[in-house]
Amino acid sequence: MEKWFSDRLKQWYSKHKRDLPWRHETDPYKIWLSEIILQQTQVAQGMSYYLAFTKNYSNVLKLANASEDEVLKLWQGLGYYSRARNLHETAKKIAYELKGNFPSTYNEIRLLKGVGDYTASAIASFAFNLPFAVLDGNVYRLLSRLFGVNLPIDSASSKKEFQKLANSLLNKKEPALHNQAIMEFGSQFCKPKNPDCENCIFKNKCYAFSHKKVAELPVKKNKIKIRTRFFNYFVLIDKQGNVLINKRQNKDIWEGLYEFLLIETKNDCSEIEFLETQSFKVLFKSKPTILYLSKIYKHVLSHQHLFARFYVIKCVRFPKSNSIKTSLNNIQKLAFPKLIDNFLRDNDIAAISNKEV
């Protein structure tokens, strides 16, 4: 252990740490819950979800007994919905197979669905004070700059080197405190952009600062390729106030969430162009009555940019399909992707459906 590193870090953390609810916990269930919620999520965004989940599901059995729809609805808006599905599956495993006993060793925790190396280290140290060093984006950034590690952080071989370094710095007597402190420092001080290097506690030791390479580190090898997609949604409503929805499947984004009938096109189409597409003509044998055409909604994901239009259509009878028929009142209880939820918040679908045609 590099004592100078541990001592400075501990002193800084004692003065500057944020008061976060999961930091007062040793309950592995709540620590696991917080770590899953905070994967690829900022604390400010994840806080309300953590509080909602701990309020609705105060223990692992309550979470296990919930339906997937209920879990996804509570998760709605947080993104990366596979986390919620894995959370629910793991809760059932712990509650039913493990009799409610949360695994207490790193290797056992690592076997849980949705738990990787970082999450297993975090739970092991925070819940059981086991000496496993965490390695998340904040830690990568701090170590890369402080020690001048020029290896790409998105490489498997590089990860092993960073993990060795993180392990060598770990305060094994206080692993929970050390891990909280190093992530807090990376998050709040050694920030991705414009870090306050002049006032940094590690300034006289920092390779990146002394070599003017703060903006260049950490190194990333792979540039994210962005896929652009165009969604055309049909909000089909009958005279009884029912609407057709589908549950997304097939390992695509938003798996397990609900959506309206969808036709995806390769390009953005005007209304006139879209009504002439073969996909539209297959769905509607005759030209339907379009009550409302929404503005274009844009939604940005890490690897995809989505553009969506919504066609609200009054139907005498629904087209033949395997879709689910439900009432307009019931859709408020279902989990929709944020893009669709934004549309529903902006528009009173019931009022639109009652327009004279």
Image (cartoon, rainbow, N blue to C red):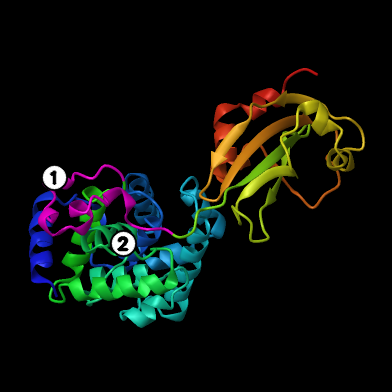
Please report the residue visible at 24 percent of the width from the left and 75 percent of the height from the top.
Answer: 167
Magenta-span inclusion, residue 208: yes
Q: Is residue 293 left or right of residue 276?
A: left
Q: Is residue 10 left or right of residue 103?
A: left
**Is 245 above or below relative to 65?**
above
Nearest the eye: 199 or 282: 199
Reading the image, the residue beneath label 2 is 140
Magenta-span inclusion, residue 83: no
**Quadrant in which the C terminus is drawn:** top right
Say what amino acid the circle numbered 1 marks: Glu
Q: Is residue 206 left or right of residue 346?
A: left
Which residues are the magenta region? Answer: 193-220
Single out the residue that lies furthest toward the front.
211
Please report the residue visible at 65 percent of the width from the left and 29 percent of the height from the top.
Answer: 349
**Quarter-wise, where is residue 297 in the image?**
top right
Say what amino acid the circle numbered 2 marks: Tyr
Q: Tell which circle, 1 or 2, labels the residue nearer the N-terminal end.
A: 2
Callout 1: SS = helix
The dot on residue 131 is: none
Reading the image, the residue beneath label 1 is 198
Single out the residue that lies furthest toward the top.
356
Q: Nearer the viewer, mark 1 or mark 2?
A: 1
Residue 351 in the image: state x and y as whole percent: 66, 23
Residue 153 in the image: state x and y as whole percent: 38, 63
**Quadrant in which the N terminus is drawn:** bottom left
Q: Is residue 127 left or right of residue 95?
A: left
Tell me the distance, in whole angstroms, between the alpha carbons under discs 1 and 2.
Answer: 20 Å
Residue 199 in the image: state x and y as whole percent: 12, 46
Callout 2: SS = helix
